[in-house]
Each structure stands twice: as structure tokens, then as C-alpha cells.
Amino acid sequence: MTSRSPEAQRLSDLARLRRVRDRIDREYAQPLDVEALARGANMSAGHLSRQFRQAYGESPYSYLMTRRIERAMALLRRGDLSVTEVCFAVGCSSLGTFSTRFTELVGVPPSTYRAEQARATAEMPPCISKQVTRPIRNREARVT
């Protein structure tokens, strides 16, 4: 049996990490945790977390929460669901955790965002409003 070259192993790991990221993108509303994601990628949870952070600059949990908050922002802009309904629709099981993460990423609580953005993006096409309202993590924020 021949062992893989380091480059072949790295490419294999990157392919598995892409599958994990794609799964998070598809199943963000499902109950996902790092252990389940790691099992699906045939990796240990620690190895997945380290490799994911190295490849994408954030932990799998952080990436999952960003996807959930992005979807929550879209649902809140629609204006037909309560904050609690949005929380559960995007896969969060705790309204408190959802509100805290939302506020960290977006800068305002979900209820404030809903009121402000429903008016601000009312005439904007969805493809444009998605771009201009995408959450920006503190480390990505531009210095003014």
C-alpha cells in the first residue's frame, strides 16, 4: 500500500471541507453540530475545526451562524414573520442566542433590523438587497 503525497492529502482535505461547507449552506436550518459535520466528512471534530478555520478563516460553528443570520435577515426584511418565528425557521433553538448572535453580526437587534430594513429595502430588488445587507463580521468591517 502506498501512502499519499502531502499535496494529494491536502487536496483531499480541501474537497472534504468544501463538502462540509456546502452541507452547512444547504442544511443551515437543521440541527447541525461540529461532531455531526465531522462524522459526515470522516474527520475528528478537532481536525475538522482546525482545517476549516485554516481554509475559510472561521470555525464551522461561526460559518453556520453566519448563514443562519443571513437567512434570518432576508426573512425579517419580508416582514411577515415575528422574530421568534424567524429564529426557529433558521434552525436556532434559543431566541436569546439567536438575538445575541444577530446583534453581534448585524449591529442591531433583530426587531430593530426588521423595522428599519423593511422600509429601507422596500423598493430594492432582492438580489441587490441581499448584497447590501450581508452581515459583516467585526474583523471584516472597513475602517472609516
Image (cartoon, grey):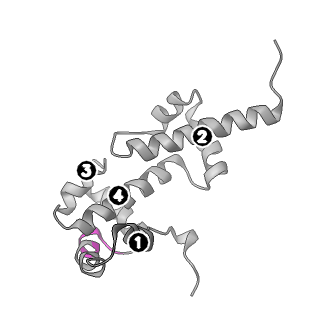
Q: Which structural element holds mark 1?
A: helix
Task: Choose the circle earlier in sequence order: 3 or 2.
Answer: 2
Task: Choose the circle earlier in sequence order: 1 or 2.
Answer: 2
Query: Which residue position is annotated with label 4?
Result: 71
Which three-letter amino acid code belongs to the residue tagged 3? Ala
Query: Which residue position is annotated with label 1?
Result: 128
Which residue lies most toward the bottom here? 144
Image quadrant in which the N terminus is located: top right
Q: Quadrant of residue 132?
A: bottom left
Query: Which residue position is annotated with label 3?
Result: 89
Between the C-alphas of marks 4 and 2, the distance is 22 Å
Q: Which structural element holds mark 3?
A: helix
Between the C-alphas of marks 3 and 1, the distance is 23 Å
Query: Which residue position is annotated with label 2?
Result: 17
| Mark 1 or mark 2, whichever is nearer to me | 1
At x 42%, y 54%, the residue is 67
At x 37%, y 54%, the residue is 68
Left or right: 7, with 143 as reference point: right
Between the C-alphas of marks 1 and 2, the distance is 29 Å
Q: Are marks 3 and 2 in contact (CB under 8 Å)?
A: no
109 is within the stretch colored magenta: yes
Q: Residues within 10 Å of mark 2 (few under 14, many from 20)?
A: many
At x 50%, y 43%, the residue is 22
Spot occupied by residue 55 in the image (x, y as percentages of width and height): 65, 49
Q: Residues within 10 Å of mark 1 (few under 14, many from 20)?
A: few
Which residues are drawn in magenta? Answer: 108-113
Identify whether 125 is placed above or below 39. Answer: below
Q: Are marks 4 and 3 in contact (CB under 8 Å)?
A: yes
Identify whether 85 is placed above or below 52. Answer: below
Left or right: 22, with 48 as reference point: left
> Residue 82: which disc?
none
